[in-house]
Amino acid sequence: MEIWKEFRLEAAHMLPNVPDGHKCKRLHGHSYRVRIFVEGELDPTLGWVVDFADIADAFEPLRLRLDHYYLNEIEGLENPTSEALARWIWRRLQPTLPILSRVEVGETCTSGCVYRGD
């Protein structure tokens, strides 16, 4: 069974590698939506895969590092596309949340990406 927990964060960025004149080359911000998915067996006693609070606890250090920051200044996010952000989150979260199955990053209400690991 797969479950997810959603988080919100605000952050600024610009994409340095897009062509000059592209709107994303200018500094701007997003209200990101991050969904953390985990997959595992349903515990027959507790009735859940994992406590949602455990997902929140695992993600909290990353949320604190990203929320209200300029993403380009964070190591590993020098070109902070949604895809790069999803991979960055995965690589830091998976060691503490080994049942992680995917990371979904919504950059706007109509655009985002899904990352399922390397």
Image (spheres, grey):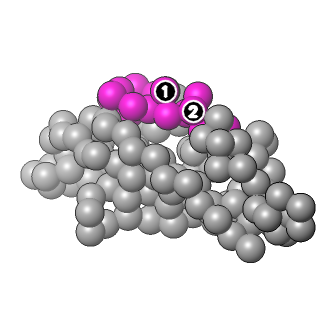
**Viewer-proximal residue, 103 or 73?**
103
**Residue 62 falls in which quadrant of the image?**
top right
Q: Which mark is drawn over residue 83?
A: none
Would residue 86 appear left or right of 101 to someone viewing this image?
Answer: left
Q: Which residues are magenta?
A: 58-74
Q: Which residue is mark 1?
A: 64
Circle 1 — which element?
Answer: helix
**In this view of the protein, can residue 72 be seen by the observer?**
no
* x and y percentages locating residue 100 in the rendered image: 71, 56
Residue at (46% x, 47% y) in the render: 7
Q: Nearer the viewer, residue 31 or 45?
A: 45
Give the residue at x 18% y 37%.
Answer: 27
Q: Residues within 10 Å of mark 2 (few under 14, many from 20)?
A: some
* Extreme-bottom residue of the structure: 1
Q: Is residue 74 left or right of residue 9?
A: right
* Residue 61 visible (yes or no): yes
Q: Is residue 6 left or right of residue 3?
A: left
* Magenta stretch encompasses residue 73: yes
* Residue 95, horizontal then vertical, whole percent: 78, 42
Residue 60's disc number: 2
Q: Nearer the viewer, residue 91 or 46?
A: 46
Which residue type carries mark 2? Answer: Glu
Above or below 70: residue 15: below
Of residues 33 and 107, the one nearer the viewer is 33
Location of the N terminus by quadrant is bottom right
Amino acid marked by disc 1: Leu
Q: Are marks 2 and 1 in contact (CB under 8 Å)?
A: yes
Counting the numbered discs, the total is: 2
Residue 54 is covered by the magenta coloring: no
- Circle 1 Cα neighbour tier, 10 Å, few/some/many (<14 / 14–19 / ≥20): few
